[in-house]
Amino acid sequence: MTIDAEPHDQTGAAAPAAMAPAGDDAAPGDVASPDDRPGGGVEGAVGGAQRRVGWFGGSFDPVHLAHRALAQAALDQLALDEVRWVVAGQPWQKAGRRLAPAADRLAMVRLMTAEEPRFVPDDRELLRDGPSYTLDSVKAYQAEHPQDQLWLILGQDQLAGLPSWRGWEELIARMGLAVAARAQDEIQAPQALLARPHRLHRLAMPALQWSSTEVRRLAATGGDVRPVVGEEVTGYIARHRLYSEH
């Protein structure tokens, strides 16, 4: 499945977090069921009810229906209370290409998620200067909501590159990994991940070939992007003349 939900991290691992998830006695390569809950139990660190939260980050340039399908799969298969769509401000790996303005990318995510109240657009990385790193954002979120259990929603390509992310060892101690795979495919985890304790849940997905790259190409050539992004995002792209220079 092609999703273009680009990670926004880079090399330079931080020291492991002092706060490891429950189940930190797991052997390297452990695979969790949806009920293996970092944070443990039904009460969180400060006594509040624990929520199960998906963390779905990317540049979303633009967001499209495969993104929504992946978020919906995570919501349903992991019994999440919400999925946070974290729009990257300055993704480090996109330095060679100009992105659509951050306000437009966020607005399109809001349109794509409007009909599902458990989808929550998150602009925290747009409000911060400098490159966007998932670890920084997760640490800030957990300082605000220490009781929540987090699952990082990824495609197979993003999982393969996870060891290049900044502070990835600390990240997998703080949250589980929810990885999309088609019904006939197995998860191919990188060796560096297999060598460390982690929680991984396989998200069963249909074969979807939509990508942000394809949307930009179609928009630039006057093609119909409605089958890929839906009516609302199509209208937004047209009104704001996005991707005409791509």
Image: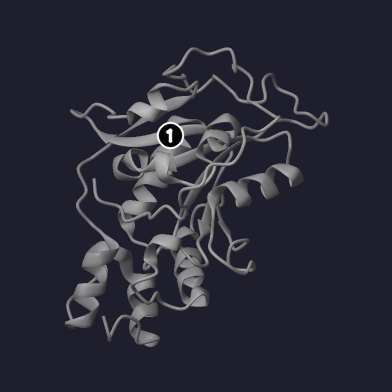
Residue 176 as seen in the image, left or right of residue 154: right
In the depicted structure, whether residue 15 falls above or below residue 126: above
The quadrant of the rendering that contains the C terminus is bottom left
Report the residue at 45% width, 17% height from top: 28
Residue 90 position (above or below residue 115): below
Picture layout, residue 61 above or below residue 12: below
- Can I make out residue 177 in this image? yes
State which quadrant residue 220 falls in: bottom left
Report x, y in % for residue 126: 58, 68
Q: Which residue is mark 1?
A: 178
**Amino acid at the residue labelled 1:** Ala
Q: Residue at x 41, y 45 (%)?
A: 164
Q: Residue furthest front?
A: 12
Q: How many marks?
A: 1
Q: Nearer the viewer, residue 228 or 38?
A: 38
Quadrant assignment for the N terminus? top left
Q: Nearer the viewer, residue 96 or 200?
A: 96
Residue 161: image x %, image y %? Answer: 35, 43
| Image position of 148 with respect to 60: above or below | above
Secondary structure beneath dot 1 equals: strand
Q: Position of residue 131 (x, y in %)?
A: 53, 63
Measuring from the top left, give residue 219's x and y in whole percent. 24, 78
Residue 154 visible? The answer is: no
- Residue 223 is left or right of residue 76, and the answer is left
Q: Nearer the viewer, residue 99 or 33?
A: 99
User: Looking at the image, which residue is at 50% across and 39% down?
Assistant: 168
